[in-house]
Image (cartoon, helix red, strand yellow):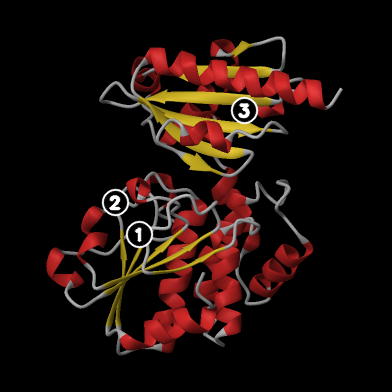
Amino acid sequence: MSTFDEIYEKIKEYPTIILHRHASPDPDAIGSQAGLARSLQEKFPDKRILCAGENDEGDLAWINTMDKVTKKDYEGALVITTDTANTSRISNKLYREGSFLIKIDHHPDVDPYADMSYVDPDAPAASQIIVDFINAEKLPLPEEVAYPLYAGIVGDTGRFMYPETSAHTFDVVAQLARTGINITEIARNISDVTFAQAKLQAAVLDYMTVDPCGAAYAVLMQKDLKKLGITDDQASVTVSTPGRIKDIKAWNVFVEKPDGTFRVHYRSKGPVINKLAEKHDGGGHALASGANAKDMDEVKQIFAEVVEVTKKYNEEHE
């Protein structure tokens, strides 16, 4: 793994820097990308610094929107990915056209795809790593840089609920808050849902199947989403809903995509589920991961695997 100093020296070499994040982004993906881009632009006003993606930020456009990039922009450019564990998840495949690739991430490094990388799986958010990088290299951290980074940390820690949250995390968010950002506005933007999304959250409980071991799953089909006027990306608001039920220990929410395949969300309160996600073109954290399923047969297989690890977890924690 490279050091912050080594990454910073590489950044100084390039007149054009293009930052990518993962597809179907969450607040940490957009927040870490935008925060680093804005800080570097403040430090190097003569560099051309762009945020690239497939314009799939949806309800998260309040954090940042993407720049228009073309293949020509990548000639002689440095590409940096943030919050993106593997190449299949990188939004906008033009990232391959750059001259050098740096990966900054907090997911387990199962796909070490970059020329240079900094990966800390103990960090609760890629945005926290970006703050550490900014501090280490004495880069600018004004309000407009702090805003997306704070959003990223709040989003990926589940409002400081998840186990990777540490005392250092609170030191970092305190530093960001001192810049003058509106933390109430950020919290509301992350938590607010449309009336249609609220209806879908309630419907998940009706669709949900619960195994006696404490594993559960719900399948959201395109017809359900269309009835409410919700896209498959907007349906991600339902992912945490089963976890609010006391006896559920691990769960999946399967969201059908327009092509008939499924986006798979894994969540857990104890059983380790990221290794399961890796079997299905995915990955992530021990208690929060994502994957893909090609059809209902794979959906059933995935849930059977979640039931198995939940039963094993119960046996080990009796």
Q: Secondary structure at mark 2?
A: loop
Count neighbours of disc 2 (C-alpha within 10 A) and say few if under 14, some if 14 to 19, many if 20 or more.
some
Q: Position of 287 compared to 231: left or right?
A: right
The residue tagged 1 is 65
The residue tagged 2 is 55
Which of 116/250 is in front? 116
Q: Amino acid at mark 2?
A: Asn
Q: Position of 195 compared to 81: left or right?
A: right
Residue 204 seen in the current view? no
Q: Earlier in the sequence, mark 2 or mark 3?
A: 2
Q: Position of residue 201 (x, y in %)?
A: 55, 25
Q: Mark 2 and mark 1 in contact (Cβ < 8 Å)?
A: yes
Q: Amino acid at mark 1?
A: Thr
Task: Say which quarter of the image contains residue 305.
Answer: top right
Q: Is residue 141 above or below residue 188?
A: below
- Measure the C-alpha gap from mark 1 to mark 3: 28 Å
Identify the residue at image location x=38%, y=29%.
Answer: 230
Which of 71/180 is in front? 71
The residue tagged 3 is 241
Residue 9 seen in the current view? yes
- Measure the C-alpha gap from mark 1 to mark 2: 7 Å
Which of 85/109 is in front? 109
